[in-house]
Amino acid sequence: MSNNIRRGFVLVISSPSGAGKTTICKKIIEDVDGIDLSVSVTTRQKRKGEINGKDYFFRSDKEFKTLEKNEEFLENANVFGFSYGTLKKEVVSKIEKGIDIIVDIDWQGTRQIQKYIPNDIVKVFILPPSIKELENRLGKRASEDKENFLKRMSEARKEISHYIEYDFVIINNEIEKAVSQIKSILFSERLRRYRQLNLNKLIDNLK
Ligand code: 5GP
């Protein structure tokens, strides 16, 4: 039997762009022990303030294709015309060591992870409180031009239509509340019987 106290899981956080997902994920990593954020690979341009290796691994199309060919991705998808992917090495060995991993990915990637590790995934969808609020948040992003903004609004509507594929839905009215709700999910999921690997031993001792 493994010495791990529990098996980790992948906490998928999806939302339309501008629902506050990145801020929420960062806050959870800061506040909670035993959970890491998976850094994705992308072919999109680096935005102002982003750091290679921290926010994303920024790679060329060719480099991305090589990673794909070498089966290094747990999932990968085309989002807004660019390639994005989660590396197996960011996830698989860590959950076996009892570390939970937050992944900030779209619905396409979520479906792939669901197929690959169906018992080790918990899926949370974050909704903005209203379309007006979503427009405000997307419009406020300095690096987006008008055309890009409209494209993202249309993509946001498409992403929202997939909320039904998720286990939990959180409405991000207030960031602190959303973070606290995700923490509740996280702490409950950690207690699932099949994730507690040493239970048999304890039960034997309790007989
Ligand atoms: P952004 O370029 O604004 O950081 O992210 C755009 C979208 O790509 C977001 O919805 C985000 O969740 C998604 N995304 C980021 N990384 C990955 C990934 O590794 N895989 C997939 N499938 N989607 C991702």
Image (cartoon, helix red, strand yellow):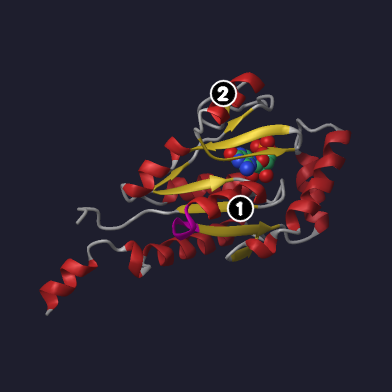
In the rendered view, would you say 45 is above or below 27? above
Q: Which residue is mark 1?
A: 111
Q: Amino acid at mark 2?
A: Thr
Q: Position of residue 180 (x, y in %)?
A: 51, 61
Pointer 2 local density, CA inside 10 Å: few below 14, some 14–19, many at least 20 = few
- Which of the two labelled residues, at mark 1 and mark 2, occupies the earlier sequence position? 2
As drawn, is 17 to the left or to the right of 196? right
As drawn, is 157 to the left or to the right of 189? right
Residue occupying image coordinates x 51% and y 35%: 39
* Disc number for residue 128: none
Q: Nearer the viewer, residue 1 or 105?
A: 1
Q: Is residue 189 magenta?
A: no
In the rendered view, would you say 132 is above or below 203? above
Q: Which residues are magenta?
A: 117-121
As drawn, is 33 to the left or to the right of 51? left
Q: Position of residue 43 (x, y in %)?
A: 66, 26
Find ligand 1 in the image and state its quadrant.
top right
Residue occupying image coordinates x 54% and y 54%: 115
Q: Main secondary structure of the magenta part?
A: helix
Q: Which residue is mark 2?
A: 66
Residue occupying image coordinates x 50% and y 50%: 116
Q: Is residue 120 magenta?
A: yes
